[in-house]
Amino acid sequence: MKLAIMQPYYFPYLGYFQLMAAVDTFVILDDVQFIKGGWIHRNTILLEGKTKPILMPVEHMSQLRLINEHDRVLDSKQRHSQLRLIRHAYQRAPHFDDVMPMVERIMKDEERNVAAYLGSLLSEVRDYVGLDTSIVYSSELTNDKNTKCEHLVLSICEHLDADHYINAIGGTALYDKAMFAEAGVVLDFIKMDPVTYRQFNEPFTPNLSIIDVLMFNSKPKVRELLNAYTLT
C-alpha cells in the first residue's frame, strides 16, 4: 500500500494533489505545530497577470498549538470579498462555470475547526478531479505520537500497513532510504515535471492554487497534469 503524509493546506498547488494521486492513502497531518508562515491558511491566484493572495482567516494563530487546535474566523464579509476576487480573476476562464460552484460551496462551509475544514476542502477537490485516494487524519490514528521525523512517518506506515511511502521532493535531506528499507518500507520522492497551460494570454505563472489549474483545464487534462511527475 502506498502512503503519503502532509499537513493540510488551503487550496494547495498542483504538486500537492500529484502526491495525493500517487498513493492509496493520504494522511492529513493535523496534530502537529501550526506554522504561521506556511500554506495552511493562504495561497495565491492569478489576477490580471499578477499573483494575488487568497486567505483563510484563523483565530489567534499560534505556533504553540496544533493545527487541529485552531478555528477559522467565520466572517461573511471577508468570504464575500474573497469570492468576488476569485470571480473577477477567473470569470472568463474556460471552466469557470464548472469550478466556481465548488469553490463557493467550500468557502461558505461553516466548519470552524481548521483541520476539519481543510480536510473537507481537500476531499471536495479530490472528488472533483476523480481521485479515489483514501483520506485519513493523523489525529485519529493510534500510532506512537511521541516520535518525530522519520520515526513518526514509519510509525504511521506500520500502523496503516504501508510498504511504500512517497514524500514531497523537499524531504530528500530529511529522510534516509536505507533506514526505511530496514523497516520494510520503500521510500520515494515525488518531483513535478515541467507543467504549463494557457492562462488567458498571459505569460505562464507556475505553482498557483489548484483553483487556477481547475479554471483553465478540463477534468481529463487535470488528470494528465496530476500524472506529470517523476518518482526518485
Image: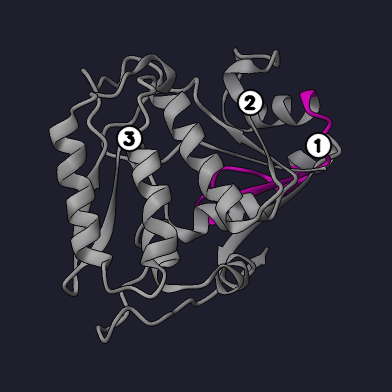
At numbered mark 2, what does the secondary structure look like: helix, strand or loop? helix
Q: Which residue is mark 1?
A: 162
> Mark 3 or 2 closer to N-term?
3
Give the image's coloring scheme: one colour
- Looking at the rendered image, the quarter that the C terminus falls into is bottom right
Q: Which residue is mark 3?
A: 108
Q: Quick check: 73 left or right of 196?
A: left
Q: Percent x, y for residue 76?
A: 18, 31
Q: Which residues are magenta?
A: 159-178
Q: CA distance from mark 1 to mark 2?
A: 13 Å
Q: Which residue is mark 2?
A: 152
Q: Percent x, y for residue 124?
A: 52, 43
- Rendered residue at 24%/24% (across/down): 74
- The answer to whether residue 165 is magenta is yes
Kind of residue at badge 2 = Leu
- Looking at the rendered image, the quarter that the N terminus falls into is top right
Q: Percent x, y for residue 191?
A: 57, 64
Q: CA distance from mark 3 to mark 2?
A: 34 Å
Kind of residue at badge 1 = Ala
Q: Establish if 229 lies above or below 126.
A: below
Q: Quick check: 203 left or right of 136?
A: left
> Mark 3 or 1 closer to N-term?
3
- Rendered residue at 15%/36% (across/down): 78
Q: Percent x, y for residue 54?
A: 23, 48
Residue 45: give its label: none
Dot in front, 3 or 1: 3
Please indicate, yes or no, whether residue 168 appears anywhere in the rendered image.
Answer: no
Which residue occupies the foreground of this view, 108 or 170? 108
- Rendered residue at 50%/33% (across/down): 119
Dot in front, 1 or 2: 1
Kind of residue at badge 3 = Lys
